[in-house]
Image (spheres, helix red, strand yellow):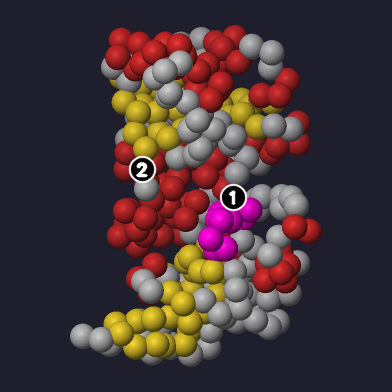
Amino acid sequence: MGWQHATVVVGLGDEGGGGGGGGASRFKRRRWVSGGGGYGVAKVLDSGHSNFKKGDLVWGFTGWEEYSIINEPETLFKIEHTDVPLSYYTGILGMPGMTAYVGFYEICAPKKGEYVFVSAASGAVGQLVGQFAKLSGCYVVGSAGTKEKVDLLKNKFGYDEAFNYNEEQDLDAALKRYFPNGIDIYFDNVGGKMLDAVLPNMRVNGRILACGMISQYNLEQMEGIHNLFYMITKSLRMQGFIVLHYYHLYPKYLEMIMPLIKQGKICYVEDVTEGLESAPAALIGLYSGRNVGKQVVVVARD
């Protein structure tokens, strides 16, 4: 079995998108990586791989340069549902959506009536976790960094409560105010001081899902020992995960999420892009809605 080069060009140009989304596909800044790549939507212009043909729309990880070599074409997913905005595939129908689904349903296994807290909740993952929690009959509170984002959580995504962490002098006191009976599930996006405040407020047998930048747990520091005490005495389960390991569940996720989107039970608001002026040149058109994606060369097994 040898390797062959197959061109899969993912479309520069003013191609139309589905579901009123136009041709715009936005790569979220959180998924930029130092190696010059990220998740996005692309259009296949040519392919030597049996799973892809000219004209297919795909989402997955590619480089930012105009032509990228993809050594693992199985990391590309063909877009079958084009009756929703293509930008959804960089959000709730892409990696962020899978992160929320796997973390909340597959790992945390929520029960009706449980108390859920989501930090930095205004991003794509937090939007979905909050809506999943409400659909599961949970009480959910989120935190965000601006009044506008707090209002979005409560008025758009159905969070029971939300607060601006920048306005709270005492995070522990804030959590006791919103969770007088404690927290069952914490979806962590930030670690650090927020995680410090959450741990004393977790209920016995609570679950913590770590999907963000965890800067805590340096056992050489007092707070590390302090936090370990709560992990043990409350029998907490804290689990990190790599969403790529769960991509085999993507068809199951689509089967669940698509009807909810079409019935208006799940909504999505794209993150506000900041610092676009310093982004790689290949991204400018994507953020300004001038094209579907960019060109990718796929290296596929013969």
| Horizontal side, residue 40 vs residue 5: left or right | right
Residue 203 seen: no
Residue 182: percent from left, percent from top = 45, 14
Q: Where is residue 201 in the image (x, y as percent from the top left)?
A: 46, 13
Question: Where is residue 72 drawn, in percent x and y?
Answer: 36, 71
Residue beneath disc 2? 241
In the rendered structure, are the residues bearing label 1 and label 2 in contact, judged by CB atoms less than 8 Å apart? no
Residue sitting at x 68%, y 76% = 291
Local packing at callout 1 (Cα closer than 10 Å; few below 14, some 14-19, many 20+) is few
Q: Please report the bounds of the magenta region as a residue range.
A: 28-38
Q: Where is residue 58 in the image (x, y as percent from the top left)?
A: 48, 74
Whether 119 is among the magenta residues is no
- Pick out the residue farthest to the right: 277
The vertical placement of 86 against 104, above or below, is below
- Location of mark 1 (residue): 30
Q: What element carries label 1?
A: helix
